[in-house]
Image (cartoon, rainbow, N blue to C red):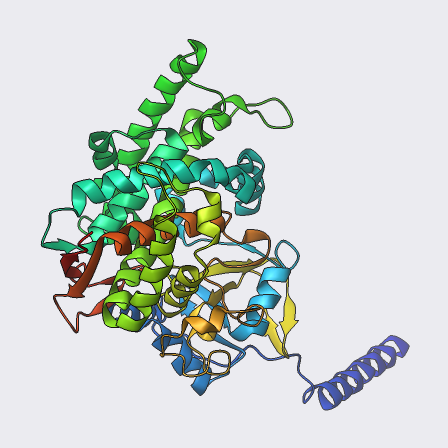
């Protein structure tokens, strides 16, 4: 009987404790998830996220939700993943400064399929390995010796593709220029025929990188995988030949990144496999030409629309051209004088940012601005949450290079190259190739757009729908 009353008492105590817990804690929940919506089952809001870019207004997806849900952070569902979009300068600063503490790099599964060997280790380990593997190639002092090579390639490019033409289509020409440079400086390929052989599949590859990962014939994802395999096969062939050339003394150990990768082991003395090197070079070739070709194309677009801006760029470039002897190449000092031209390029990068944003992954639960971010959620920062936000850039759609004079925009508001430990290492490389392109362009021509209201699409980078055809008017010297 005593056992019965003891059990009854324990049950009563448990009931009272549970009641007290519910009474005191029911109305004291933990931080809520960010406001927002997750869209359709499985696909979430991916189609709307991508379609605003296809329609030429990638900022609409972000800015609409900032206005409706939160200007700080909102939740969504992108590319098959629960996601939070961090907005504004504070969001950029938080993600960039918490790399490998609260967040780490993350790419959609489409990227893993297109770069299959990169899945052997975590993205964090891959990033560390890649940054150790890269020589000091992208530092300004190292890039100085490549300015002359860039100028030489630019002269050949404009002579072949622009001179003696009444009309040209800019976007494919800009891609040809930046890809030619990347091939020359990364893997020492300069022959135009071999460059063209590589260039053809790169458009398909880039489109497949950020796409809905449906591997069916005809989809961008499927085409991207096939294009990747094709390029990697070519790269492995080049790598094998370079090994032979290095062994026979026909190639230099310091001539480019490829030689460096072949001859540099990790801390254990282990060297990368050929396919792994091919993947790394493939990533560099994409990063080394795709974004810059978009920027160069939009520079042509805006200079056609803004004659007063063109005039100032032209005058600056001609002052430099007048100091050069016949046949003399541009040098590092010449590029440092192109201050207004670079301000123009920066304003182009703000209005038509090649990098729309990038993903991170939460590696632990944390609270941001009062909202709970669960471990495993994907986090996205968007350039347009600041680039086209009047809070940071008054009259955001107005083209105004003076925004970049003096100390320039506030920290974390102008982020065309990302930020923090994962800021694009090729930022200075991109500056050089863009300025060399601008120099040869304005020195040779004025031009006008042949389609005044040509639509802009973003897939995955901004580009004119018809490639920006222009009519050229050569300068008379």
Vertical position of residue 236 compared to residue 43: above or below: above
> In the drawing, does residue 81 fall left or right of residue 51?
right
The residue nearer to you, when weighing 381 against 340, is 340
Return the x and y of residue 365 as percentages of the image width and height: 64, 65
For the point 57% across and 72% down, the residue is: 410
Rendered image quadrant of residue 456: bottom left
Seen from the viewer's position, the closer of residues 450 and 83 is 450
Residue 445 drawn above or below residue 198: below
At x 35% / y 18%, what residue is drawn? 241
* Residue 110 seen in render: no
Which residue is at the far left?
A: 166
Q: Is residue 358 left or right of residue 411?
A: left
Q: Tell me where residue 197 appears, x and y as whole percent.
A: 21, 34
Left or right? Give the position of 235 relative to 466. Answer: right
Q: Nearer the viewer, residue 163 or 351?
A: 163
Work out whether residue 369 or residue 246 is closer to the camera in this orientation and state it: 246
């Amino acid at each position: 009987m005593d056992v019965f009353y003891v059990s009854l008492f324990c049950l009563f105590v448990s009931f009272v404790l549970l009641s007290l817990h519910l009474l005191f804690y029911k109305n004291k929940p933990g931080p809520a998830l960010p406001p927002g919506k997750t869209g359709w089952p499985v696909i979430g809001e991916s189609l709307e996220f991508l379609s605003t870019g296809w329609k030429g207004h990638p900022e609409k997806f972000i800015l609409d939700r900032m206005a409706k849900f939160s200007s700080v952070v909102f939740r969504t569902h992108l590319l098959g993943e629960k996601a939070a979009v961090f907005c504004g300068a504070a969001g950029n600063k938080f993600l960039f400064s918490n790399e490998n503490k609260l967040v780490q790099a993350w790419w959609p599964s489409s990227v893993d399929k297109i770069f299959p060997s990169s899945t052997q280790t975590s993205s964090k380990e891959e990033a560390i390995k890649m940054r150790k593997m890269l020589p000091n190639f992208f530092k300004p002092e190292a890039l100085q010796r490549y300015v002359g090579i860039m100028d030489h390639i630019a002269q050949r490019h404009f002579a072949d593709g622009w001179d003696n033409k009444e009309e040209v289509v800019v976007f494919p020409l800009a891609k040809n220029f930046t890809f030619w440079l990347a091939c020359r400086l990364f893997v020492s390929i300069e022959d135009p025929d071999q460059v063209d052989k590589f260039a053809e599949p790169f458009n398909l590859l880039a489109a497949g990188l950020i796409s809905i990962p449906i591997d069916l014939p005809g989809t961008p994802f499927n085409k991207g995988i096939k294009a990747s395999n094709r390029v990697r096969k070519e790269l492995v062939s080049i790598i094998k030949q370079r090994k032979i050339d290095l062994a026979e003394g026909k190639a230099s150990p310091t001539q480019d990144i490829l030689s460096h990768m072949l001859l540099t082991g990790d801390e254990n003395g282990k060297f990368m496999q050929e396919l792994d090197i091919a993947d790394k070079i493939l990533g560099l070739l994409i990063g080394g030409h795709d974004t810059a070709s978009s920027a160069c194309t939009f520079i042509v677009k805006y200079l056609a629309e803004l004659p007063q801006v063109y005039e100032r760029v032209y005058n600056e470039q001609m002052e430099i051209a007048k100091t050069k002897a016949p046949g003399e190449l541009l040098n590092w000092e010449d590029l440092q004088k192109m201050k207004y031209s670079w301000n123009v390029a920066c304003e182009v990068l703000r209005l038509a940012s090649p990098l729309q944003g990038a993903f991170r992954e939460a590696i632990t639960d944390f609270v941001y601005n009062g909202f709970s971010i669960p471990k495993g959620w994907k986090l996205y920062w968007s350039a347009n949450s600041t680039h086209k936000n009047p809070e940071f850039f008054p009259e955001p759609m107005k083209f105004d290079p003076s925004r970049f004079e003096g100390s320039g925009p506030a920290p974390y508001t102008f982020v065309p190259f990302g930020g923090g430990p994962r800021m694009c290492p090729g930022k200075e490389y991109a500056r050089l190739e863009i300025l060399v392109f601008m120099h040869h362009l304005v020195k040779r021509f004025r031009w006008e757009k042949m389609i005044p209201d040509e639509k802009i699409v973003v897939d995955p980078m901004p580009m004119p729908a018809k490639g920006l055809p222009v009519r050229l008017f050569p300068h008379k010297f």
